[in-house]
Amino acid sequence: MDIAALAGKAAEGDSDAFVKLVKQLEGSLYYMARSLLGKEEDIADAMQETILKAFKSIHTLREPKFFKTWIFRILINECNNIGSKRSRTIAYAEIPTTAASMGGYEMVDLRESVERLEEPQRMVIILHYFEDLPIRQVAKVLDVSESAVKMRLSRARDALQHSLPSIHEGKMRYGSI
């Protein structure tokens, strides 16, 4: 069952549907929390509070198709409450399947380059490319305009292009990618 259908059932009071939703999204939620916080205990706290708040207020969700956007917004608020402003280290457990064809060195380069991005750029990259959210939903999650998301994506792509040697060398040799 897809996320929207499960969210609809959960909003109607089906707690099993809510559990399935959380299980389906827990990896993505963890990934985002880890990108904002560094300590495992902070990540666990943020996820626990997010799930609890989502469970208590799922009945207020107006559009089940936006459940993922809604719960990411709750998570980001929780991470901010915990103190995401302190220095942090990101460890990406997985690179999305879209990067699966990359060689080992290129994957390491990608991980390191994304880790070095400034937080606003890193968040739009994670939400848009790794979590597959459309620009409109990324804007809602981050509470910014769509043009701000597009600008951050553009700056992040530029930064990644310059920091990834294989992509930069490919552009120099073969033109724009």
Image (cartoon, rainbow, N blue to C red):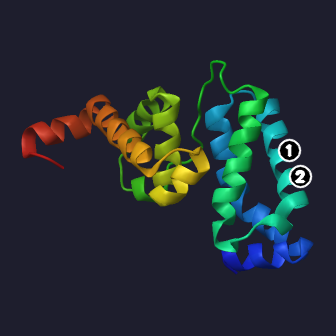
Query: Whole-percent x and y of residue 54?
Result: 82, 56
Dot 2 crowding, Cα within 10 Å, few <14, some 14–19, many 20+: few
Marks 1 and 2 close (CB-CB < 8 Å): yes
Query: Whole-percent x and y of residue 50?
Result: 81, 48
Name the residue tied to disc 1.
49
Which residue lies at the image location 72% right of the left edge and 55% below the top edge?
A: 71
Asked if 139 appears above or below 164 in the picture, the reply is below
Asked if 25 appears above or below 113 in the picture, the reply is below
SS category of the residue bearing label 1: helix
Observer able to see residue 6: yes
Along the viewing direction, whichever of 145 and 107 lies nearer the viewer: 145
Tag 2: amino acid: Leu
Tag 1: amino acid: Glu
Which residue lies at the image location 36% right of the left edge and 56% below the top edge?
A: 101
Observer able to see residue 104: no
Q: Specify the label residue 52 is tagged with.
A: 2
Which residue lies at the image location 68% right of the left edge and 40% below the top edge?
A: 33
Q: Is residue 117 left or right of residue 48?
A: left
SS category of the residue bearing label 2: helix
Along the viewing direction, whichever of 95 and 116 lies nearer the viewer: 116
